Image (cartoon, rainbow, N blue to C red):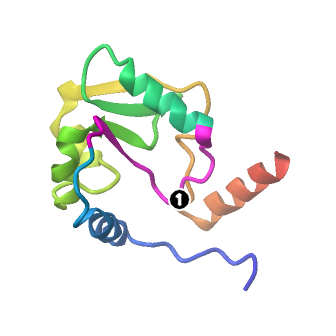
Amino acid sequence: AAGDVPEQSTLSGRADEFRRRRRGRPERALQRRDVCLADQVLPDTADYRELIDAFAAMPRGSILVPFFNGRRGNPVVFSASYAAEVVSGHVNPGCRKLIEEHPDEVFIHAAAHDRFALDMDTPEDYAHVLARLAQC
Protein backbone atom coordinates (compact mmCIF):
# COMPACT_ATOMS: atom_id res chain seq x y z
CA ALA A 1 0.00 0.00 0.00
CA ALA A 2 1.07 3.60 -0.46
CA GLY A 3 3.38 4.76 2.32
CA ASP A 4 4.50 1.26 3.25
CA VAL A 5 8.19 0.76 3.87
CA PRO A 6 9.70 -1.32 1.07
CA GLU A 7 11.18 -4.64 2.10
CA GLN A 8 14.90 -4.55 2.69
CA SER A 9 16.95 -6.15 -0.02
CA THR A 10 19.86 -8.22 1.17
CA LEU A 11 23.44 -7.20 0.60
CA SER A 12 23.97 -10.42 -1.33
CA GLY A 13 21.03 -9.48 -3.54
CA ARG A 14 22.65 -6.14 -4.28
CA ALA A 15 25.93 -7.90 -5.03
CA ASP A 16 24.19 -10.25 -7.47
CA GLU A 17 22.51 -7.32 -9.21
CA PHE A 18 25.81 -5.45 -9.44
CA ARG A 19 27.62 -8.47 -10.94
CA ARG A 20 24.76 -9.18 -13.40
CA ARG A 21 24.79 -5.62 -14.72
CA ARG A 22 28.57 -5.62 -15.22
CA ARG A 23 28.83 -9.04 -16.94
CA GLY A 24 29.26 -8.89 -20.66
CA ARG A 25 30.02 -5.18 -20.81
CA PRO A 26 33.28 -4.19 -22.39
CA GLU A 27 35.56 -2.36 -20.01
CA ARG A 28 35.39 1.33 -20.56
CA ALA A 29 38.41 3.59 -20.59
CA LEU A 30 37.35 5.15 -17.28
CA GLN A 31 39.91 5.61 -14.56
CA ARG A 32 37.48 5.27 -11.67
CA ARG A 33 34.43 3.35 -10.53
CA ASP A 34 31.92 4.13 -7.84
CA VAL A 35 29.33 1.95 -6.20
CA CYS A 36 26.13 3.82 -5.42
CA LEU A 37 23.79 2.10 -3.01
CA ALA A 38 20.07 2.08 -3.71
CA ASP A 39 19.18 3.06 -0.15
CA GLN A 40 21.02 6.37 -0.38
CA VAL A 41 18.56 8.79 -1.89
CA LEU A 42 19.82 12.16 -0.67
CA PRO A 43 22.98 12.73 -2.77
CA ASP A 44 22.30 14.79 -5.88
CA THR A 45 24.23 15.51 -9.06
CA ALA A 46 26.42 18.14 -7.37
CA ASP A 47 27.30 15.65 -4.62
CA TYR A 48 28.43 13.05 -7.14
CA ARG A 49 30.43 15.73 -8.97
CA GLU A 50 32.03 16.59 -5.60
CA LEU A 51 33.26 13.01 -5.25
CA ILE A 52 34.47 12.80 -8.84
CA ASP A 53 36.45 16.03 -8.40
CA ALA A 54 37.79 14.90 -5.01
CA PHE A 55 38.95 11.60 -6.52
CA ALA A 56 40.71 13.43 -9.36
CA ALA A 57 42.45 15.73 -6.86
CA MET A 58 43.51 13.06 -4.32
CA PRO A 59 47.14 13.60 -3.35
CA ARG A 60 47.55 9.85 -2.76
CA GLY A 61 45.65 6.58 -2.76
CA SER A 62 43.25 4.90 -5.15
CA ILE A 63 40.14 4.54 -2.96
CA LEU A 64 38.15 7.58 -1.88
CA VAL A 65 35.82 7.20 1.09
CA PRO A 66 33.51 10.05 2.09
CA PHE A 67 33.13 10.80 5.80
CA PHE A 68 30.94 13.23 7.70
CA ASN A 69 31.51 13.88 11.42
CA GLY A 70 33.35 10.58 11.82
CA ARG A 71 30.74 8.51 9.96
CA ARG A 72 31.80 6.59 6.89
CA GLY A 73 29.63 7.27 3.89
CA ASN A 74 28.95 6.12 0.36
CA PRO A 75 29.49 5.97 -2.50
CA VAL A 76 33.05 4.76 -2.32
CA VAL A 77 35.01 5.78 -5.42
CA PHE A 78 37.89 3.55 -6.45
CA SER A 79 40.42 3.06 -9.20
CA ALA A 80 39.17 1.02 -12.13
CA SER A 81 41.94 -1.47 -11.35
CA TYR A 82 39.79 -2.78 -8.46
CA ALA A 83 36.68 -3.33 -10.62
CA ALA A 84 37.33 -7.02 -11.30
CA GLU A 85 37.92 -7.63 -7.57
CA VAL A 86 34.65 -5.91 -6.65
CA VAL A 87 32.57 -7.56 -9.40
CA SER A 88 33.99 -11.03 -8.74
CA GLY A 89 32.15 -11.20 -5.46
CA HIS A 90 35.39 -11.10 -3.47
CA VAL A 91 34.22 -7.73 -2.17
CA ASN A 92 30.66 -6.66 -1.50
CA PRO A 93 29.28 -3.62 -3.34
CA GLY A 94 29.54 -1.57 -0.16
CA CYS A 95 33.30 -1.96 -0.55
CA ARG A 96 33.93 -2.57 3.16
CA LYS A 97 36.33 -5.44 2.44
CA LEU A 98 38.08 -3.44 -0.29
CA ILE A 99 38.74 -0.68 2.24
CA GLU A 100 39.90 -3.19 4.88
CA GLU A 101 42.23 -5.00 2.47
CA HIS A 102 43.83 -1.85 1.06
CA PRO A 103 44.06 0.62 3.97
CA ASP A 104 47.17 2.35 2.55
CA GLU A 105 45.21 3.19 -0.61
CA VAL A 106 42.30 4.85 1.23
CA PHE A 107 41.91 8.61 1.07
CA ILE A 108 39.31 10.15 3.39
CA HIS A 109 37.12 12.82 1.81
CA ALA A 110 35.75 15.06 4.58
CA ALA A 111 32.30 16.06 3.33
CA ALA A 112 30.73 19.30 4.49
CA HIS A 113 27.27 17.67 4.58
CA ASP A 114 25.71 14.41 5.77
CA ARG A 115 24.10 13.23 2.52
CA PHE A 116 26.79 10.59 1.91
CA ALA A 117 26.33 9.18 5.43
CA LEU A 118 22.54 8.80 5.52
CA ASP A 119 20.76 5.74 4.16
CA MET A 120 17.53 3.81 4.66
CA ASP A 121 18.27 0.53 6.40
CA THR A 122 15.34 0.59 8.82
CA PRO A 123 11.76 1.86 8.88
CA GLU A 124 13.00 4.62 11.20
CA ASP A 125 15.64 5.64 8.64
CA TYR A 126 12.94 5.69 5.96
CA ALA A 127 10.72 7.96 8.09
CA HIS A 128 13.69 10.24 8.81
CA VAL A 129 14.51 10.58 5.10
CA LEU A 130 10.85 11.27 4.24
CA ALA A 131 10.71 13.99 6.91
CA ARG A 132 13.92 15.51 5.61
CA LEU A 133 12.71 15.51 2.02
CA ALA A 134 9.47 17.19 3.12
CA GLN A 135 11.56 20.11 4.42
CA CYS A 136 13.07 20.75 1.00
For this rendering, which residue is in front, 71 or 23?
23
Q: Is residue 59 left or right of residue 45?
A: left
Q: Which residue occupies 69% across, 78% down?
A: 4
Q: Is residue 59 above or below residue 90?
A: above
Q: Which residue occupies 27% across, 47% down?
A: 28
Q: To which residue does mark 1 refer?
A: 39
Q: Is residue 42 left or right of residue 34?
A: right
The number of discs equals 1
Q: Which residue occupies 46% across, 55% down?
A: 37
Q: Is residue 117 left or right of residue 9?
A: right
Q: Quadrant of the C terminus?
A: top right
Q: Dot 1: within a 10 Å radius of its alpha carbon, few (fewer than 14), some, or many (20 or more) residues?
A: some
In the rendered image, residue 41, in percent from the top left (x then y), is placed at 60, 53
- Displayed quadrant of residue 59: top left
Q: Is residue 56 above or below residue 37?
A: above
Q: In the rendered structure, which amino acid carries the disc numbered 1?
A: Asp
Q: Is residue 17 above or below residue 132?
A: below
Q: Which residues are magenta?
A: 29-45
Q: Quadrant of the N terminus?
A: bottom right
Residue 41: in magenta span:
yes
User: From where the camera sits, is residue 81 visible?
Assistant: yes
Q: Secondary structure at mark 1?
A: loop
User: From where the camera sits, is residue 70 visible?
Assistant: no
